[in-house]
Amino acid sequence: MHAALGVRPTGFRAPGYTMTDDLLDAIQASGLTYDSSVFPCPPYYAAKAARLLRMKLGGQSSRAILDTPRVLRAPTTPYRVGRPYWTPGTGLLEMPIQVAGPLRLPFIGTSLSMLGPSAARLLTRSLIGAPFVNLELHGVDFLEARDVPSVPSALQPDLRVPLRRKLETFAAVLALLREHGYALLRLDEAARAFS
């Protein structure tokens, strides 16, 4: 990453948002200063659990790991991790994956692109006033089906959304946040502000 972007990673994000206390200990021991893996999102958790169950019942295997349901009780704003990691304490800084509203709906690039500009702005409005909004984007959020024909859209339904529409959605979300005084920062910059 440093060679490509000129920025050294100072944080960590676990694949599949699955975390453990031991992994957090290793992250901190490695010299990283924050984590952004905890995703206290009931709809995401339920969808992942259902998908893994369907695969198992269909005789398919998966290397995906389902986090403990207790992660759904984690704070939704940055906090120092305790033991267990979904409770506040004095450990590593956690910048949780963003959820919105009382239902803790997922506020990530994939779900926003599926909503489209109007609904994404509505979801964004539920976060106005929060001290921090963590908009997580994956590389796939900037792709469409023709870019990766080998990936079935059933596995990645947001690939059916045209890139133009995705970009309109992200622009609408960012414009609304900026209208309400939010600064656009990289996650490492935001983590320094919370440290």
Image (cartoon, rainbow, N blue to C red):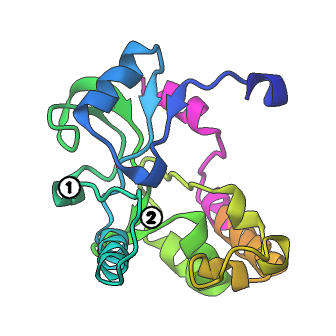
* Image disc number at residue 165: none
Q: Judge the density around disc 2: few (<14), some (14-19), many (≥20) Cα neighbours within 10 Å.
A: some
Please tell me whether residue 14 is drawn above or below residue 25 in the rendered image: below
- Residue marked by disc 1: 68
Name which of mark 2 and mark 1 comes first in the sequence: 1
Q: Residue at x 36, y 55 (%)?
A: 39
- In the image, the segment drawn in magenta is 176-195
Q: Residue at x 61, y 60 (%)?
A: 177
Q: Could you say which is closer to the camera, residue 140 or residue 180?
A: 140
Q: Residue at x 30, y 72 (%)?
A: 49
The amino acid at mark 2 is Leu
The amino acid at mark 1 is Thr
Q: Judge the density around disc 1: few (<14), some (14-19), many (≥20) Cα neighbours within 10 Å.
A: few
Q: Is residue 80 left or right of residue 11?
A: left
Q: Residue at x 20, y 55 (%)?
A: 68
* Helix, strand or loop at mark 1: loop
Q: Nearer the viewer, mark 2 or mark 1?
A: 1
Q: CA distance from mark 2 to mark 1?
A: 26 Å
Q: Is residue 37 left or right of residue 22?
A: right
- Residue marked by disc 2: 127
* Coordinates of residue 30 in the picture (x, y in percent): 45, 15
* Coordinates of residue 91 in the picture (x, y in percent): 26, 23
Q: Is residue 102 left or right of residue 154?
A: left
Q: The N terminus is located in which quarter?
A: top right
Q: The C terminus is located in which quarter?
A: top left
**Farthest front residue in view:** 59
The quadrant in which residue 150 appears is bottom right
Name the magenta segment's main secondary structure. helix
* Helix, strand or loop at mark 2: loop
